[in-house]
Image (cartoon, helix red, strand yellow):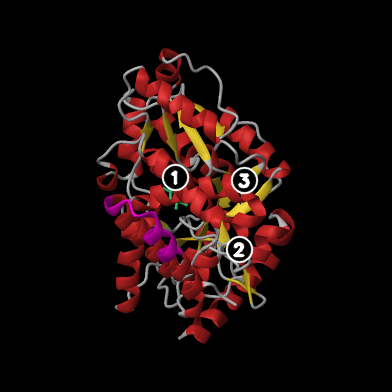
Amino acid sequence: MRMVAVLAVAALLTASSCGSGDDDKPPPSTVEVFTWWAEGGEKAGLDALVTRFNADCPGQRFENGAVAGGAGVNAKQALTQRMARHDPPDTFQAHAGAEMTDYIDAGQVEDLTAYYDSWGLREALPAGLIDDLTVHGKIYSIPANIHRANVIWTNPTVLSRAGITAPPNDLPSFIANLSALKAAGIEAPLALGRDWTQLMLLEAVLITDLGPDGFAGLFTGETDWSGSPVTKAINDFTVLLSYGNLDRDTLDWPQAERLLIDGQAGYQLMGDWEAADLTAKGFPGYGWFTFPGNGKTFQWLADSFTLSTGASNISGTECWLKTVSSASGQQAFNAAKGSIPARTDIPSTGFSPYQRSAMADWKSTTPVPSCAHGSACSQPWQTAVNAALNAFSTTHDPKTLQSALAQAATQFIRE
Ligand code: BGC
């Protein structure tokens, strides 16, 4: 089956292009696109891509297979079940990096290397990203964007009521600001959500306490999860949690974001999908800064799209992937999604002030990957870490958390 699909892809590359269907023999016309982009800025991004797809791919119809839930918590489970039933969507969203290897190892995605050559993607995408996507010489997905994870979003009105007018320079000043907000009557100044969002906060603190190299080494085996810098980071993380809302474990990220919008919190750490979402939700006056102490570190992740093994509409999916990879597709999608284009040849006009700053930073900062969003960790590793954080959220036992994190690394670090 897999070989048949590979041959079909190769044939399509030479024989067809988007929308040039043979009138006598119409191809299957529906492309099921599976994502977790179901509302707010995420849906706006998807809609913008669909508009391009409709223009680029006449005769093909987009079918929305989205399953809601931040960071794909529900979608990934639903996808696993569909894969087990041999009922995959034609294409699905997956994070570039370690997370893709789960699908590659299981033979669930087709080799797309030929597209890179025929669509000029080797020139259009950064070499480092292509390296991160390449597994044993082959590439299995097409990146749509680059998101940044280590950003704090603010409600400037709430901050100014506590006399806070500038971003903190380091973690102690950030904690001092959180205290000032509490003193000014904001009970939970740091908006928090469930497990994976807490992992994002812990990762940001780890970047501050270990530096970019030490942090990146946690995922390659070069940095010891049992060491004292990680102990310090867990202590700092615990202090930060004490400034957050107590119902954190029951909230997805948009619900935690709502606390910021409504003025019940002054700060939220979240990936830069929040920029587009705040705008989509009528709150364009947000502020932002890189997590205190992260310096010139850009914690990156990239949404990419696959061709499922056993996809029922290969030519339509090819056209979807081509739109995703194209300059016009990436311009339209990213402007609405809050991310920046993965392609390097797209001008910054038409992007928000936040996005223009992220584009500049992406060129001048040190990239580190994200565990919560798959560029650093496989899915089983993410699951183990999220479970450890869930437990910690109730037990508050830092030693058990650190040993669970160390154990997960030992179990899941790849050669
Ligand atoms: C995805 C983003 C998405 C975010 C929140 C991340 O894992 O890469 O595209 O906006 O989750 O759902």
For residue 393: magenta?
no
Disc 2 crowd rating (10 Å Cα; few below 14, some 14-19, many 20+) is some
Instruction: Give the percent coordinates (x, y) of residue 172.
Output: 53, 32
Q: Amino acid at mark 2?
A: Thr
**Crowding near pointer 1: few (<14 within 10 Å), some, many (20+)?**
many
* Label 3 crowd (10 A; few <14 / some 14-19 / many >=20): many
Circle on res. 292 = none
Amino acid at dot 1: Phe
- Residue that carries the numbered disc 3 in the rendered image: 298
Residue 187 location (% of width, % of height): 30, 26
Of label 1 and label 3, which has the lower sequence position?
1
Ligand 1 near label 3 (Cβ, under 8 Å)?
no
> Element at badge 3?
strand
Quadrant location of residue 362? Answer: top right
Residue stretch rendered in magenta on the structure:
394-405
Q: Residue at x 47, y 75 (%)?
A: 411
Q: Are marks 1 and 3 in contact (CB under 8 Å)?
A: no
* Quarter the N terminus occupies: bottom left
Earlier along the polypeptide chain: callout 2 or callout 3?
2
- Is 16 positioned to the left or the right of 316 in the image? right
Q: Is residue 415 above or below residue 354?
A: below
Residue at 69% over, 37% down: 360
Q: Is residue 30 or residue 136 the one in the foreground?
A: 136
Can residue 323 be seen here? The reply is no
Which disc number belongs to residue 237?
A: 1
Counting residues from the N terminus, which is met first, the one under dot 1 or under dot 2?
2
Residue at the disc numbered 2: 223
Question: Residue 391 at what x, y percent from top left?
Answer: 30, 57
Camera-near label (2 vs 3) is: 2
401 drawn magenta: yes
